[in-house]
Amino acid sequence: MGIIRASKLAHAYSRYDENGQEREVIRAIDGVDLDVEEGQFVAILGHNGSGKSTLAKHINALLLPTKGALWVDGADTAKEEELWKIRQKAGMVFQNPDNQIIGTSVEEDVGFGPENMGIPTQDIWKRVEDSLRATGMTAYRDHSPNKLSGGQKQRVAIAGVMAMRPRCIVLDEPTAMLDPDGRRETLKAVMELNRQENVTVILITHYMEEAVDADRIFVMDHGRLAMQGAPREIFARAEELQKCGLDVPQATMLAHELRKAGVAIPKGILHREELVDAICQLR
C-alpha cells in the first residue's frame, strides 16, 4: 500500500437558499480511488471546480470523507485519534504564502512548526538550518518575510513545512499567485526536495507545464478521477484533456497539430527541446 491511498472517496456538501432550505447536494469528490507510492512526485490536474483542491484537503484531514476512506501512511483520516499523526506526516502548502507565514524573520517562521511540536531547541535550529538549505533560503534567514518576493515567500512556506519533517508535502496550487520567475523558483525547490530528500510530493495545479516532470498524473473532472498515468501517456491524449477543460503543454500541442497535418512527429512530446529534435530528424 502506498503512503497515500483513497478507496471510493467521496465528499458532498449542501447548498442552501435564502430561507435556509437545502437546495441541492454537491458531490465535490465522487468515488475516487488512488494510490501514491512513497517518494513519488505526483501532479493532480483539473479545471476550476473539478475537485482537486477538495482532494488535497482530505490528504491532510482538513476535510473528512462523506463516504469511502483515505489513508495516510496507513492512518485513516476519518479517525480523530489519528489526526495528529496524519498532520505530522502530510504537510500542506497553500496558494497564498502570506496565509502561512507568521514570523518576523525567516528563521523564526521556519522554526515555528517544530517548536509547537515540542522539539528540543537544539534540534529545532538544526531543522531550520537543514530546511533553509534545502529550499535555497539560507542567505535570507534574518530577513523579514514581508521584504521577500512571492517566490521567496513560497519557499519559506515550504521550508516551514519541511522543518516539521513530513514524509509527504501537498501543495495546493502554490504558484497560482506568482509571476513566472516565482513559479520557476517554487517548482525548483519542490523538485529538489523530492529528488534529494525523497519527500513524496503531491502538486495540485492547473498549469500543464508544471506537471510534465511528474512521475504520475491524476486528472480530475467533476469530482471524478478521469485519467491517470505517466506524463507522456496523459499528454498524448490531447483531445481527452480538452474535454476535461484542460490544455496541454505548448510543445505537446504543436506536435499534436503537426501530426494531424500529416507530419511524422512522435507522440508523447513534452518539452520544446524534444520537439526541436523531432523536427530536425524529419527528412
Image (cartoon, grey):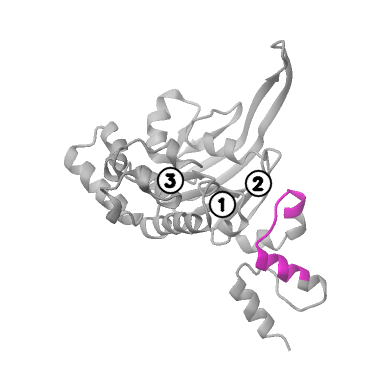
**132 up-or-down from 255: above or below:** above
Location of residue 211 in the rendering, given as x and y in whole percent from the top left corner: 57, 57
What residue do we see at 31% from left, 42% from top?
A: 110
**257 up-or-down from 57: above or below:** below
* Foreground tag (3 vs 2): 2
Q: Farthest residue toward the right?
A: 261
Instruction: Classify mark 3: residues with Cα within 10 Å, few (<14), some (14-19) or many (20+).
Output: many
Reply yes or no: does residue 245 show up in magenta.
yes
Asked if residue 236 lies left or right of residue 89, the reply is right
Residue identifier under label 1: 43
Q: Which residues are magenta?
A: 241-257
Residue identifier under label 2: 46
Is residue 166 visible in the rendered image? The answer is no
Q: Farthest residue toward the bottom?
A: 283
Instruction: Classify mark 1: residues with Cα within 10 Å, few (<14), some (14-19) or many (20+).
Output: many
Asked if residue 43 lies left or right of residue 140, the reply is right
Report the predominant secondary structure element of the magenta stretch.
helix
Location of residue 133 in the rendering, given as x and y in whole percent from the top left corner: 30, 56
Residue flagged by tag 1: what amino acid is it? Ala
What residue do we see at 25% from left, 48% from top?
A: 142
Structural distance between the alpha carbons of marks 1 and 3: 13 Å
Location of residue 86 in the rendering, given as x and y in whole percent from the top left corner: 42, 34
Residue flagged by tag 2: what amino acid is it? Gly
Q: Secondary structure at mark 1?
A: strand
Location of residue 175 in the rendering, given as x and y in whole percent from the top left corner: 52, 49
Q: Mark 3 or mark 1, which is nearer the start of the sequence?
A: 1
